[in-house]
Amino acid sequence: MDVSVDFAGLKLKNPILTASGTFGFGLEFKRFGNLESLGGIVVKGLSLKPREGNPMPRIAETPCGMLNAIGIQNPGVEAFIKHKLPKLPWKTLPVLANLYATDAAEFGELAAVLAAEEGVAALEVNVSCPNVKEGGIAFGQDPNQITKVAEAVKKNAGNKPVIIKLSPNVTDITVCAKAAENGGADALSLINTLSGMAVDIERRKPRLANVIGGLSGPAVKPVALRCVYQAVNAVKIPVMGLGGITTAEDVAEFLLVGATAVQIGTGNFISPDTAFKVAEELPKVLERIKAESIDEFIGSLKLPL
Amino acid sequence: MGANNCRAVKVIDIKALGLSSPGEEIVELKLEYPEWESGWRAGQFVMIRPLSWPLDLIWGRPFSICNADDSSLTILFQVVGRGTERLMELKKGDSVNIWGPLGTFFSKPTDRPVLMLAGGMGLAPFCGYVDTHPQHENLKLFFAHRPPLEDYPYKSLSDKVEVEDIRETKPEDIQSIIARVDDLVKEYAQKDGLITACGPMPFLTTVWKAARKYGADAELSLENRMACGVGACLGCVAKDDDGHHTQVCTTGPVFKAKDLSLEG
């Protein structure tokens, strides 16, 4: 079965992408599979200047999930453009850049730098990181800020699609989804991590130096699915779903509720070949469940009367 | 390298090496060799996740390669947490997903004396190091440990190279270990030897401080919690000499002491 999709103008050979922060800059995974067999990759979050991230410990395993408080450690956008992007097969593999900044103007500046790069297929805007003090989740919880950031990025994005990555840590995801759409976003991706915490009762300490972190993995999948379902029904722009996907069956669930594409994040840690295997399995699963085509299947959820 | 760097292999054997320390079992796990095209080097590690693990354990677990040949790969582990408790449940014939070999490795000079400093499970990589080193007369092992020697694959090393050990049974023993490490590092620095070390962080910090003090050429293998092992999650960082975060899984786990900052 042909599982290619059009996502906000991006032609994807399949709807399987890898999520930012879980796939490095892609190069780390070349030894575990063919990168070009994926629909695309979203690289590690980039800021204008290099960032050290948060102190250790900054990851903790929780039942069916993990907490992280990495804090957008990255080498900065210039180092990415100079040292990482040229090594990626971007002519045949859509490479999506993930942007992190502390205010709308800085987001716009970063967008201009990345939009000028031929190898960058689209811009995913992180307005929802729970692990940074400035420019993180506060943006993602304020619809006005979401609109402002979307406008600032869109203004400088040239012809590259702008995808706003939303936080689930809000009362009403549809308000944020509409705020992004109103700001000119071409698409949405959701969800970012759920704000969470883990403690060590022996040492009476938090398991993360940052105390609070972002929960991801299979534990968050029902929340992600609900958010995607609600967002799809609130906006006209396409939605990329992520949160707890580890199998092709999981992908089918997200497609069914209306996601046009998906991202695999923590699943890449369960095994470094997870995304490759899921991409290989998806056509077989869609055939098994008797989908006529991927276009027919997307959003074909039958609701109870 | 091909995509066979991540594959499922069968358990050949699993056994506790000694039963003298209940609750602190040290286990030898022997797996089918994963047919790595690139071979392996002592100091490198693998990520292991049994296929039977449900999703309540998300990550694989990192282990130093203890030894390997064309037919098998051996790791050692001590039962210390949820992951190693579940690893203990493996049986012959079970399948585990393994990816590797990962990370950097110990140098293997043949024209200089080499001191191996092992703390507890830090003994593991030195089994392979000794077996693949052509000049055993140049090697000396110092081993600091809590469970009795019989619980470790120690005899296989003491039969081949000069060895010395201190068992920590009471708090005062730690000072003896620190003093002896300091003396040995000084001695090997003076004779332009290579110092290699693996063990828990307090042990490595002791080695690191001594190496700095005496200007010794030392290589330290860091242990750290990891989610991916391949440089993606950034959960395993350490501080480099400039105070920047550096990834243990890909820049290490074996670092030159001069390139690390283990204080603070």
Image: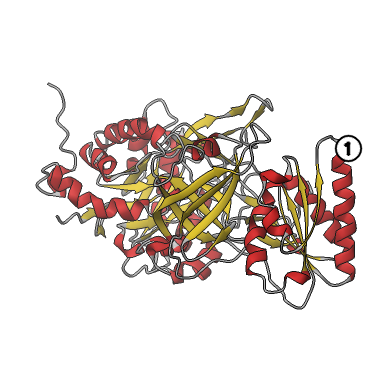
The percent coordinates of residue B98 (x first, y second) are: 45, 53
Identify which amino acid the numbered label 1 is placed on.
Glu
Is residue A202 positioned above or below A93 on the image?
Answer: above
Q: Please identify the quarter of the rendering in which residue A243 is found.
A: top left
Report the front residue among B226 and B142: B142
A149 left or right, relative to B28: left
Is residue B239 positioned above or below B151 on the image?
Answer: below
Sort mark 1 into few (<14), some (14-19) or many (20+) by Cα contacts within 10 Å. Answer: few
The percent coordinates of residue B196 (x first, y second) are: 74, 62
B84 left or right, relative to B34: right
Please, what secondary structure does the residue beneath circle 1 have?
A: helix
The residue labelled by disc 1 is: B172
Q: Please identify the quarter of the rendering in which residue A3 is found.
A: bottom left
Q: Is residue A23 visible?
A: no
Total marks shown come to 1
Q: Residue at x 57, y 29 (%)?
A: A198
Residue at the farthest bottom position: B111
Mark 1 — on which chain does it sit? B
Q: Is residue B226 visible?
A: yes
Q: Quadrant of the N terminus of chain B?
A: bottom left
